[in-house]
Image (cartoon, rainbow, N blue to C red):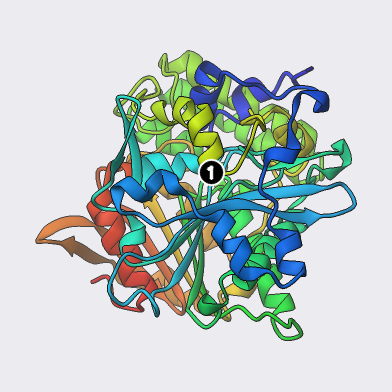
Amino acid sequence: MVVYSWSRFTFQLLIVVECFLYLYLTIQVAADGGRNFEDSLILTPYIERGKISEGRRLARVPLTDSLNITSYSGFFTVNKTYDSNQFFWYFPAMSPDNKTAPVVVWLQGGPGGSSLFGLFNENGPLRVKNSKLEFRKHNWALNHHLIYIDNPVGTGYSFTKDPKGYCTDEKQIGEELYSTVIQFLQLFPELQENMFFVTGESYAGKYVPALVYTIHENNKRAKTKINMQGLAIGNGFTDPKFQMVYSEYIYQIGLIDWNQKKLLENIEKDIVEYIKQNKWNAATEKFDEFQEFFYNATGFRSFYNYLYTHERSDGKDYTGLIQSDSVRRQIHVGNLPFHNRTEVRNHLKEDFMKSVAPLVSKLLDHYRVLLYSGQLDVIVAYPLTVNYLRHLNFTGSEEYKTAKRYIWKVNNDIAGYVKQAGKLTEIMVRNAGHFVPSDQPVWALDMITRFTRGKSLH
């Protein structure tokens, strides 16, 4: 497999899964002949034939029973022409009021990062320690119906049987995710009236708005309606043009000097100019140059938390476990490979530096939007999000620019700082890097709970 020269750096930035997968995956993306599609549980035919009860029974995951956790997993066909199928893993809410608990979709970034990273290392009810499953105390399934989706196809366990099935833009990604969500609600119709939220982090700063906008556009005429209420994005890479303000931030935290700052500013100017000219590949390759500059100037090998010079290795254990024969059988993936990200990222190369800010602007007229940032992140640092928000035209944009900043506390601890304007809530989470739910699980749970319940964060 030929990998573009830019990809060594470009896609390391947005999800630490890259580091883990390349080092620890024992099964790599291979020729189609090496895959056993037949052993995977495709639930779409059961839905189409009205065999809902049978489909749900087959989707049940016995793996989590020993921890008293109910869960379901399988695949939904999202493109019949190319036989493209998305993998999901669903955890019903554990709270006594679970019948009315909000439904939350979680999407990882990348592009090509499996959402199972978020499940096992950030906000899911499971974690892996010493090759064994354990219960995570502060997880979002305590009071939410939580759905993890490997998106787009070619990510994690999601697969397509035809190279033409890979997504090349956010419109296609939104449509295929929408298909998955609709089929999920047909399989679990008791959740159709529950409040529905889409969440994610990093490059999912594009996926989340793409899905919510697709829901918004289809909901009026859809037979299966979604009770869409809001979206939440953590350290989202959403509007590259206005997020190219790394130089000032990296200088202010002391990782580069004044002369290096000036050199980095020139790189940023070139990137913005390429974006203005719609030279997407050139912009992406120039962005790769920025990242290499950062590595050389700082000696760092990680962008995710500036307290650490290298990627942390405490999230790698899950990749081996989920590829064991026993777990494969129990989560219904058969012998499918757990994909690395090469095909997904190569097909989305031109999409990488495009903006979805216009979608965010439209969605802010209709839904609650939470944008949260870890204080210690570099690759999508808090000032980058603020800069694109200050250039975003939406109902409440002028109010946002002058909004008061409040202290957000959890159990009398200062968890961060919050600003609100219109339907927008913007939060800076203290002492957290790129992966906020992992670094601050108690505060992250408080944040998402207050947001989905419409409660104030100050």
Q: Position of residue 454 (x, y in %)?
A: 36, 79
Quarter-wise, where is residue 40 in the image? top right
Going by the image, does 170 lie left or right of 394?
right
Residue at the spot of label 1: 331
Q: Quadrant of the C terminus?
A: bottom left
CA neighbours of label 1 inside 10 A, class few (<14), some (14 to 19), many (20+): many
Could you tell me which residue is drawn at 50 percent across and 55 percent down?
A: 60
Marks counted in the figure total 1
Nearer to me, 54 or 195: 54
Identify whether 40 is placed above or below 401: above
> Would you say residue 366 is visible in this rendering?
yes
Identify whether 170 is placed above or below 214: above
Nearer to me, 34 or 30: 34
Q: Position of residue 342 (x, y in %)?
A: 70, 27
Going by the image, does 3 lie left or right of 405?
right
Could you tell me which residue is drawn at 50 percent across and 78 percent down?
A: 396
